[in-house]
Image (spheres, helix red, strand yellow):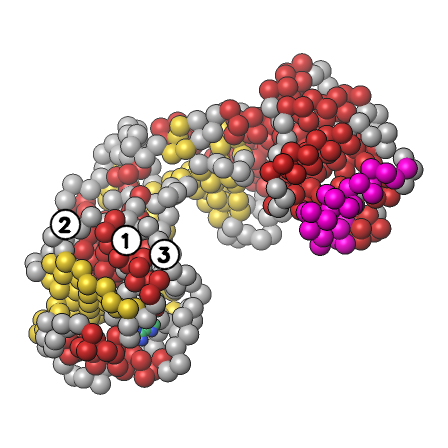
Amino acid sequence: MKADNDLYRQMRTLSAEHLWTIEVPKFNQASATDRPRLAGLIRAVGVVFASSGTASQKVAVKAWMKSLLQDPSEKVRRYAMAAIPKLGGDVEAEKEILSILKTSSVDREKRKAGAALEKIAGQETLQTLAQSQTPLPFSEQKIRANVARQTNPSSLRMDEILERYDTLRISLRCRKGLEALLAEEVKKSAKHGGKFRLLEIRGCHVVVAATAPFTLRDLYQLRCFDTCAFSLGRIDNPQAADAIQRLAKLIASPLTERLMSSFTVGSFRYRLSFSDAQTSDVLLQKCAQAAFEINPRILNDARESAWSIEVYVTPTAALVELSPKVLPDPRLAYRMGTISAASHPPLAACIARLADPQANEVVWDPFCGSGMELIETCLRGGVVKVIGFDLSEEAIQHAQNNFQAANLAGVKSHFIVGDFRNYIAETDLQPGTVSLVVSNPPLGRRVRVPNLQGMFTDFFQAASRVLKPGGKLVFVNPLKLEPADSSLRRTYRQVVDLGGYDCRLEVYVKL
Ligand SMILES: C[S@@+](CC[C@H](N)C(=O)[O-])C[C@H]1O[C@@H](n2cnc3c(N)ncnc32)[C@H](O)[C@@H]1O
């Protein structure tokens, strides 16, 4: 075993070319007694060719792997069965492996055949399953999910109406500190024909209820949340022996099926996860298996599923939520390109809410990056001109493309590569000509800044100079730094968690 692992580790550092032209021929020439000793090579070939090698080499490698299923050595066959799914199974491989499953007398080999079929199964395996009188060494759910993924792939229906919405609780998730802005967005939208009303704020979740039949797209009219989830219920006493069964009942409930059948085209598949590190994979599989036994139309499947089910475990309760994997996010249809330090989209939307543009606004972002704050502000209406600066040429290119894709008719734009401190020299940004400054500046983490304090001092000064009286500055402040200029009066401050570190979201008004 150790020798197999050592050989595998050594072989997997070699290139696809070397493996195929040197090591595989050596293996083929080895005697029947030597081949099992070299089985580590089979594993390495599977791993290396899963991500490299030419198309024609991959075809040849797969044919070689399939030929190994006929090898007289049980060990060689077993290694080939483990490697084949990595290269993508096919009907021929499936048939061979099914035949090993039916004819082998070695338990270990049968189990390996079952594990391979869980990953590559098609109609043949389903037939075997239907005809078998005895239990087979694989999970029926995994087999069904595998077949469903291939024959009936799923995607979300953004425009399908959910008619029965009555007792549904929808959890909108956001970064800590943004809850109040998101809750306010829900309340304001409800006043203007929105279909959701605020129920409560719970941690980083804003819980809403529908007030009318709705679509997923209706939900995605709200811009200040990150992801959403439908509550499937909760159980108390999650450490009790019957907890798995009670969780399974929620996972496989009629509510889950109703939501999936409204909002999904294709098979009903979800990825199950538990929030706590203590829940082992074995327990998770037991829970998924129990749910499958209750409702076999809903399948746990980690790959390419349109839904995820998360179990949030606390010492006294476990909450079960169903989340649609809305990708790509329709709210970001304008995003043609991005930068590594781009803003968290809901944060950009929150900045735009705080900016609250009225009529004829001229908006400046001195650190515009890919332009999210400027675009989100324009999407609220009232903006006539945006000016974006960034040191990075690539960022400005993205900002221009994104701005164009956002289709903001009637809004002039001026994007400039350069340091914001040269603002007057490089543009027509004269003192008192801007009504809004919005920005998510470099916070000194992902984008290193030699003198962060000095840069923010200059930033306050620049904003104060270009803003006209009554104008607003809305930005993320990583420092406990106040403007030296008393003509900027702070009207809002909220600490926000930006993914492990706190910053302050601040609004200043120019007096
Ligand atoms: C956090 S990112 C902005 C992200 C942006 N809001 C977006 O959505 O892509 C900060 C940006 O500030 C730019 N930057 C850093 N120092 C600058 C300076 N002195 N003048 C102008 N831009 C600067 C960086 O190149 C970076 O793109």
Tell me what residue is drawn at x 80 percent, y 27 percent.
70
Mark 2 touches mark 1? (CB < 8 Å): no
Residue wearing tag 2: 409
Earlier sequence position, callout 2 versus callout 1: 1
Earlier residue among tags 3 and 1: 3
* Identity, as a three-letter code, of the amino acid under mark 2: Ala
Magenta stretch in the rendered image: 8-31
Amino acid type shown at disc 3:
Thr
Characterize the local packing of mark 2: few (<14), some (14-19) or many (20 or more) Cα atoms within 10 angstroms.
Answer: few
Q: Quadrant of residue 399?
A: bottom left
Q: Nearer the viewer, residue 250 or 141?
A: 141
Q: Quadrant of residue 343?
A: bottom left
Q: How far across and down, in percent of the image, does residue 375 sit? A: 23, 56
Q: Amino acid at mark 1?
A: Asn
Image check: 466 left or right of 288? Answer: left
Q: Quick one: SS at disc 2?
A: loop
Magenta highlight on residue 236? no
- Residue 37: percent from the left, percent from the top? 86, 43
Q: Which is nearer the N-term, disc 2 or disc 3?
A: 3
Q: Is residue 292 left or right of 321 when viewed as pictured?
A: right
Name the residue beneath numbered marker 1: 402
- Could you tell me residue 22's position as x and y percent? 77, 46
The residue identified by callout 3 is 338
Binning the other alpha carbons within 10 Å of mark 1 as few (below 14), some (14 to 19) or many (20 upward) gives: many
Residue at (67%, 23%) from the top-left corner? 92
Q: Report the side of 270 relative to 61 (left or right).
A: left
